[in-house]
Image (cartoon, rainbow, N blue to C red):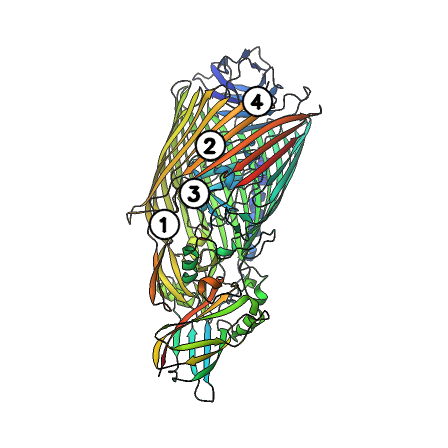
Amino acid sequence: MRLILIILLCFVCSAGYAQECNNTLTGRVADRHDGTPLSGAVVVLMNTDKATLSDFDGKFRFSSLCAGTYSVEISHPECQPRIFSVTIPSEDELNIELEHHVELLKQVTVVGTAYSTKSETLLENRINLATLEEFSGASFGDAINTLSGVSSLNTGNAVVKPMINGLHSSRVTIINNGVRLQDQEWGAEHAPNIDINTAGAITVLKGASALQFSGDAIGGVIISEPARIPIKDSLFGKTILHGATNGRGGSVTTSLTKSYHSGWYATLQGTYKRFGDFEAPDYVLSNTGIHERDGSLRIGYKQFDQGFEGYYSIFKNEIGILRASHLGGASDQFSAIGNDRPLIIRDFTYDIESPRQDVTHHIAQLSGFKRVNDLGKLSLSYNFQFNERFEYDVRRGSDKDIPSVDLELTTHNVALDLESEIKDNLGIKVGLAGNFQNNFADPDTGVRRLIPDYDQYRASVYGIADLGVTENLNLEFGGRFEYTYMDAKKFYRTSFWESRGYDMLFPDIVIEEFDNQILTNPKLKFSNLSATFGLNYQFDSNYIVYANYSLASRAPNASELFSEGLHHGASRIELGDLGFSSEVGHKIGLTLQKKSGILRFTVNPYINLISDFILIEPTEIQQTIRGNFQVWEYRQTSARLAGVDFDLNADIADNLEFEHQFSYINGKDRTMDLPLINMPPASTTNSLHYTFPDFYDLVLSVKSEYVFMQNEFPDNNFEVFFPDTGTTEIIDVSTPPDAYHLLGLRAKAGFNIGDAGTRLDLGLAVANLFDTSYRNYLNRLRFYADDLGRNIMLNLKISY
Amino acid sequence: MTKYLFKSAFILMAIVMASCSNDDDTTPVPVNEEEVITTLTATLTPQGGGTPVILQSRDLDGDGPNAPVVTVSGNLTAGTTYDAAIVLLNETENPPENITLEVIEEAEEHQFLFFTSGSLNATITYVDFDSDGNPLGTQFTLDAGTASAGALRIILKHEPTKPNDGTILGAGGETDIDVTFDITIQ
């Protein structure tokens, strides 16, 4: 017998045509572990005489329902009953996940999460809580990386930036508990400021269809939501201890939730994470430690018809950047790339020295909703975000403890949304939002500002409608308009200002001239229109097809507009362009999904055509007193990204599941007819999971990950003359590393402690089992050092 | 309730807009790079007197688009030993900051490397050392041998491996200065 039973309830609510009482409600009850249907679940439509049992496939159906709000109770012999509300007819496909501790003395300790659909016509890739908990000691990006088509742009192993279908940074919108994260996401070496342990589930949309959040997600949207709290009297919590041999550290995270039948609830959560230097198979990766401290608090009141919530979270992370990656000019780069081993290898330590990042992110949000008769669900939210970023470089003298980058980004956001049923089969969601952002760069760094001081005002309005054409066919369409006004105060070097011809192009914006710098006041306005159109069609109970077109439009970010100087972390000079226009992407995605049966799969081909795509590429060599540096300049071009993501799950035998993922993408600069840089290489992951249902839920898994060599890449190599040897050498910054194969093992099991409902889950995992030396094309530090060696991890979760 | 929601929305937006408008007129102050070394001057004084030869590399816009201006004041005399001293300046600041002092203060974390190339017949010997007895190189002697011409490359390494074998690879660290002078001995 299963000790933990997690039920996935999947309701497909379809609406009939006539106004009155011929609506239907269908759904499916399944075990979330392996997707097997649960038959014999009792489904009761409360306050009616209707009740039914789920059939052999876990399905149930109610017909002849009148419009209105119903309470549905679901119970199963091995589950505690669960009650929730459904509005009939509903335009939403309602996915309800229940997590459940069965053996708890028949006592009710249900952690329930209910997530509504984010897009009707784009497949949602969801990472559930159980998987997230396995990543408790890792980063947000590491967890998302497990999905097909999602990779990451890394700086070492601690800065993991999610990449969706080859796009990252400002092209991927991250939503944390309803708040669009504003954390200087433009930088390729800036990881998202989210504690993975605050998420109850993470949804990834590989497109811009989530128009209620943003219109500029040319790559996609990542939505992290906290666990849903049941409306009942309960007190529950969990603590996860994680330890790892690589990095010789670990993390502890704990959360406690108290909820009341009256609708009041509160959750307090905290995480502490500490790692020393990580290790490659042959050496210590010096100065790669992590020190992270996070906390969050949610207090709210929720009923079916109204509710409000206050939320606060703090995320503080100190990350060491590989010491050997901090270089002078091209000759240092030549020695570093030419050498198998990093040029600086020290003994293991927990100390984090320069270069390092120290980032603090605060989020505070107040939100509320009210269901108003004849209007719909009205929501209002205000959030405040404060991001403080310090970057410490290797410096001399009294500057040693002064950061080279000291930025404060403050964002206020107000949003009003209305979700409404216009007709039985037509639902709409409309809203408007106002956003103000201020960036302040502290001048005391003694280093010219990387990002200038600016004020940014943004107003947006959106509307989304979905229409049930037939029982099997749903259409979705929507649009969003955003107006952005940016008022910046930017210092340019006089020599740069003149060499770019800005003195001729923008003479009006000069405020004041200093010795060798010019203060300017660029005022930039961008109007961005985004739209989505799509359909889903269920052509028998097993197969569903999604087709979606999305138009996304993104204003250039501060780094693309204003960069003009040496980027120490990248050992190159980066130049932006004040004259950039918005980037516009057209993405078409098709998905065929088979949801149940012995063999389940998803195949998702897509194409993304982006005009005025902003990319950065090397243009020349610049001489400075520190030697030669490669100059990387942003430019706009027309790009095409096309690829396919494939997922397959097969029940090979009783309790034995095979899981396969394959992703391929090809990126092209159409103007220059060249491959795009930093496109994820093709990769495939294959796993076997064997479950011992009668032995403490023991699951043994073996996972193989094969990453091909990227053969499509632009040639950005450059030549440098070495005066002392009189030779000219090619510095190879282009050739991707070889293909690699990594094997991992995992075992997990659960035990009950006493009869108070306490449960212990143990997980033991080995990553990179054979201690393979490899380098990852998408790791910006691949020139300097190998990636991580073998890592043995122990995960211990106590639920109470 | 609806009214209330709209009202609070309005109030919130008003607060936001009000809080936005107060830092509009502040003008940021310019930041002068404190770290940058704009100018390296090596003064080579012949032992026993004579006109010094001055080697200078000057890059007033730091890592801006303008290349450094490299000058050599004259030729070296064959068979002469020169006492040389290096001065590093940051001329983006006013008055210019003498970075040599910081380098001497942190001698253990710095080292100049010298390389000759071409047929240049010159020998360089370190004069100053850090507290561990490893070479620093803000002062050195240059023995000009027979008449010849070639390049003298001066590199300043920050946080090199010390002691090292005097090669770029062996020293490691990161390059703070890398300049090359064309030298003629006659």
Q: Residues within 10 Å of mark 2 (few under 14, many from 20)?
A: some
Label whose residue precedes the other's in the sequence (2 or 1):
2
- Asked whether the viewer can see residue B90, the reply is no
Q: Closer to the camera: disc 2 or disc 1?
A: 1
Q: Residue furthest bottom?
A: B49
Q: Marks 3 and 1: same chain?
A: yes
For disc 3, the marked residue is A216
Q: Closer to the camera: disc 2 or disc 3?
A: 2
- The disc label shown at residue A125, or none: 2
For disc 1, the marked residue is A735
Question: Residue type at mark 1?
Answer: Thr
Q: Chain of mark 3?
A: A
Question: Residue type at mark 4?
Answer: Ser
Task: State yes or no: discs 2 and 1 in contact (Cβ < 8 Å).
Answer: no
Q: Marks 4 and 2: same chain?
A: yes
Q: Judge left or right: residue A335 versus residue A754.
A: left
Instruction: Say which quarter of the image contains residue A85.
Output: top right
- Asked whether the viewer can see residue A127, the reply is yes
Label whose residue precedes the other's in the sequence (2 or 3):
2
